[in-house]
Image: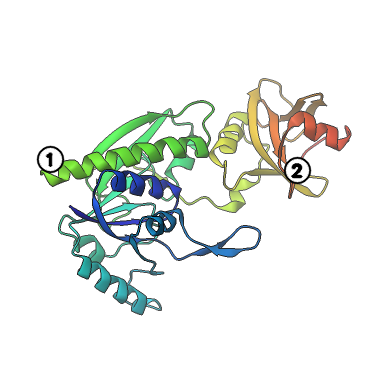
Amino acid sequence: MKIVFAGTPEFAREALTALHAAGFEIPLVLTQPDRPAGRGMKLQASPVKQFALDHGIAVAQPPSLKLDGKHAEAAQAAQATLQAVQADLMVVAAYGLILPKWALTLPRLGCLNIHGSLLPRWRGAAPIHRAIEAGDAETGITIMQMDEGLDTGDMLLMEREPIRPEDTTATLHDRLARLGGRMIVEALELAACGGLQPVPQPSEGVTYAHKIDKAEAAIDWALPASQIARRVRAFDPFPGTTFQLAGETIKLWAASVLPASGTPGQVLHAHGDSLVVACGEQSLALHTLQRPGGKRIAARDFLQSQGGDLPARLG
């Protein structure tokens, strides 16, 4: 079976690695254009592109696949490249570009998507973050036949994954990426012998995982401590959660809920290795923090660096 693979970040690289190791023919990879990254803001290839180049796979990086608009010429070139490949199927994982109808229907068997949730819950861009933020007990991977909707296509395979109490988006992402790689290999093996059974998504239980906005990072101490703690885990590694201290934006990377209460934002305890802040309900023990330009440090080290000088309330 001849496959075109479309994906960009590490989540997608895991799937591409699994497909390559399973021996599928992959003549072409689609990935997003190189982006500036790091302190020097130098152009950096995506993890998928890096893997493709390391393994001699051709790469196309159109900024868009829409055949009209300012990137029409690049899209038309990509269309011609895909037509020349004559792939049986396209596998899509966190590609980041919308696939128009021509791209969805060009491969003989259409396009399969590796989605990081139990559809129809958490359709959209940030399913792993939103599942943790919402306090879901489990999530998983859905292999889906793509259509023109936003993650609305028929389900082909689904497997569940528990969300552990200590999970961050980083840790859960890695488990789901490995699961997605294993499942897409299974799906293509089934597709090769006509063994996939499409199941329409139910109309009940639809939720949308909207893209994470940096503005969501700021902590609102008036929220329940449990909600803030989930957001801390959901926003690790990006964008982190933040609060204001003496004109600095401090990032909070680990916290736990305590039963103590007080005025939201009030510093209830700041001694030894314990920094406790009151929330709208209960309070939050802050465990791992980071100053601008610094490293993540434990609360004890943070308090020592402050010299015991903390305001009565955090911003």
Q: Which residue is mark 1?
A: 195
Above/below status of 257 relative to 305: above
Residue at x 44% of width, y 56% of height = 50
The quadrant the C terminus occupies is top right
Residue at x 74% of width, y 45% of height = 294
Task: Give the residue type at disc 1.
Answer: Gly
The quarter of the displayed image where residue 191 is located? top left
Q: Which residue is mark 2?
A: 315
Question: Mark 2 falls on what kind of element?
Answer: loop
Residue 278 in the image, given as x and y percentages of width and height: 72, 29
Badge nearest the viewer, 2 or 1:
1
Which comes before the other along the chain, label 2 or label 1?
Answer: 1
Residue at x 41% of width, y 58% of height = 49
- State yes or no: discs 2 and 1 in contact (Cβ < 8 Å): no
Label 1 neighbour load within 10 Å: few <14, some 14-19, many 20+: few
Residue at x 10% of width, y 43% of height = 193
Q: Is residue 276 visible?
A: yes
